[in-house]
Amino acid sequence: MKFLILSLTFLFLLSSCAQVGVVPSPTPEGEVQTPLPGETPTGTQTLVPEESQLPTPAVGEEIPLPPPVLKGEFTFEEVLKARRSVRDFKEKDLSLCQVGQLLWAAQGTTSPDGKRTAPSAGALYPLEVYYFFKDGWGHYNPEKHVLEILGKEDKRQDLTRASFKQSWIAEAPGVFVIVGFVERTAKKYGERAERYVILEAGHACQNLLLQAVALGLGGTSVGAFSDEEIKKILGIDALPLYVVPVGYPANP
Ligand SMILES: Cc1cc2nc3c(=O)[nH]c(=O)nc-3n(C[C@H](O)[C@H](O)[C@H](O)COP(=O)(O)O)c2cc1C
């Protein structure tokens, strides 16, 4: 029975997002044509209500994310013009569609050979993105476009403490953390690797922030934190590069 419920939930979640003014026009059958990550637009998926929340996770579970939506309400130039750092958020959770879209913007795949939304020196992809929310936290797997749940605790207060008590971080409904594994890039680029990995985090973070604006959200690129504390929270030995709280702006 549990398996059946999980399967049905996954099937539902694998559908694509119905976002007002964001999705392509539906067909008469109520379906939209939206490509899966890394695919050309051919198949059709059922609409996912925009407000669907992330399911309560179990550790080790993979939460499938809806395919990214490739048309937005605003032009690229409007998004550029509107971006500002946002540190005051409404008490409103991000939807599954928004989380999937933001993760995809940061590091999602955009071609069958695994190339991504952000450029990467030698296509070596040293960045990893983690997502923290009230019910847990997880790692984004770009190839599968899933959130791999690593914990059920709300660690946003820990992120605030690690970021020298920038208290507003814990008030954001979603916090993204971008880290780099420099050794992946160093294999080819040696001493220039650290520079390249840091530059790449800038690309990924800007994608994430601009996507947030395009979805009517806002966020801030936070660079002031203790590397050691962030590594402890994540339980990994990588270079922490950005903490990015995202939510609905309290003062739009
Ligand atoms: C590398 C970097 C680190 C930053 N670190 C922080 C930070 O720790 N806390 C914060 O509130 N804002 C941080 N910011 C955001 C800047 O304060 C913000 O971009 C700047 O004030 C310009 O405002 P705007 O983003 O609204 O245009 C950082 C920005 C960058 C690029």
Image (cartoon, rainbow, N blue to C red):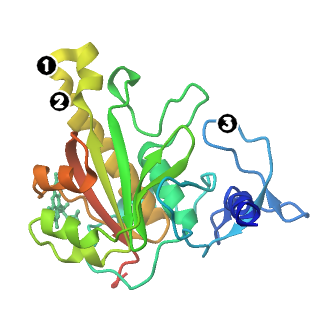
How many numbered callouts?
A: 3
Question: Which kind of residue does numbered mark 2 sit on?
Answer: Glu
Specify whether 127 is left or right of 58.
Answer: left
Quadrant containing the C terminus is bottom left
Q: Is residue 17 above or below residue 205?
A: below
Among numbered discs 2 and 3, the one appearing first in the sequence: 3
Image x and y of residue 101, in percent? 52, 56
Q: Which residue is mark 3?
A: 39
Q: Residues within 10 Å of mark 3 (few under 14, many from 20)?
A: some
Q: Position of residue 78 (x, y in %)?
A: 44, 62
**Residue drawn at the location 72% of the way across and 63% of the way down:** 12
Which class describes the residues within 10 Å of circle 1: few (<14), some (14-19), or many (20+)? few
Q: Can you tell which quarter of the image residue 5 is in?
A: bottom right
Is disc 3 placed on a helix, strand or loop? Answer: loop
Please give the residue where the numbered disc 1 appears in the rendered image.
Answer: 191
| Extreme residue toward the front, this view | 1
Q: Amino acid at mark 3?
A: Glu
Distance from the alpha carbon under mark 3 to that under mark 1: 35 Å
- Give x and y (percent) for residue 213: 42, 65
Residue at numbered disc 2 = 194
Whole-percent x, y for residue 118 in the image = 41, 38
Depth order, front residue of 215/244: 244
Task: Assign a secondary structure to mark 2.
Answer: helix
